[in-house]
Image: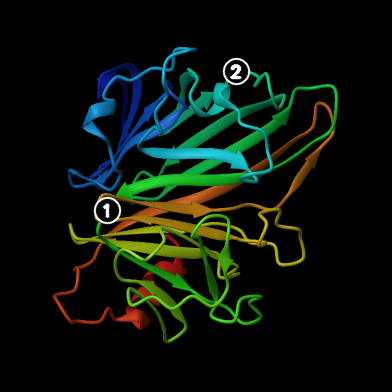
Amino acid sequence: MKTEVIEFFGYKNCIALENGAGTRVVLCPQAGGRVLEYSLNGVNALYLNPAQQGWRHVPGIPSVDPCGGRLDIGPENVLAPHPDLWLGDWTGEVTGEGRARLTSVCDRVTGIRLVREFTLAADTSRLVCEQRMINASDKPVSCCHWSRTLAVGGGLCLVPLTPGSRFPRGYLMYGPGPVMNFKPADPNIRVRDGFLEILGTPANPKLGMDSAAGWFCYLMRSDLLFVKRFPVYPDRVYSEMAGLTISIWYFRDEMCELEPIGPRETLAPGASASYAEEWELLPHRFPKAQEAVDLDKIGKLGGKGS
């Protein structure tokens, strides 16, 4: 294992974690406490916008939607905007071999402080990303984990669906406007053999699912399969408006946002709650034109864990 502090993508004091299995992770404390690189054998799965290189948040100056492996809290459209967490500078520290921590300031709007712990396995691409939400205010706060990882665009999203969905087709589509379409029909989306397949740019980019499978994956044109695994609690309340456990935002061939969503946490003053995702990168051939993905194989790879 190799752990060092480096300069990367225009930012100083980034933390690089690297193992003998060809995996490298670069954490950036600036501009929202993000992952800027998650790569296998030199191929970065994360989308980086060259125009944002070295960007820092300055109050009063027009903002950007930061790129990379973002994490956040929600629920979307309910929790107040929190630029201190989403855009502000965090602190970073190495906490052990293959381990690092990013810590935010206390957000002035929500009263939440976030701590993100990252652990890279020594012999596989497995990366555990754990986010702890701490109520540093003097009143109760309700929030949830909301992952907002931007992967390189143009890939295939493969989401295992589970029985008992509230949605007739296992998913819904947001838009146009504030509409949530629970019976979408889109030529770039299909349900096959128990999976939702997003094959290309949909009519509207944001989709939501209530799958209880606890994982999904994204197959990139670089022949890399990005798997996300995460806990799902069917008996708990999910506070997104449609009770989502997953959201996907597929924007043309430019980027794709991979979003596990955690259950509602109601935190008393001083209380905290954690939620952990497991990421994995696996070599997997991208299908040729008109070729279908072997979903049985995907199910075995995605659901097995490391």
Between tags 1 and 2, which lies in front? Answer: 1
**Relative to the observer, which residue lies in front, 9 or 97?**
9
Residue 278 bears which disc, if any?
none
- Residue farthest front in this picture: 177
Quarter of the rendering occupied by the C terminus: bottom left
For mark 1, give the secondary structure. Answer: loop
Residue that appears at 17% across and 82% down? 290
For mark 2, give the secondary structure. Answer: loop
Residue 55: quadrant of the picture: top left
Label 1–label 2 contact, CB within 8 A: no
Type of colouring: rainbow
Q: Position of residue 46 (x, y in %)?
A: 30, 44
Label 2 belongs to which residue? 105
Residue that appears at 29% across and 19% down? 54
Q: Position of residue 52 (x, y in %)?
A: 29, 27
Label 1 belongs to which residue? 153
The answer to whether 83 appears left or right of 108 in the picture is left
Could you tell me the amino acid type at mark 1? Gly
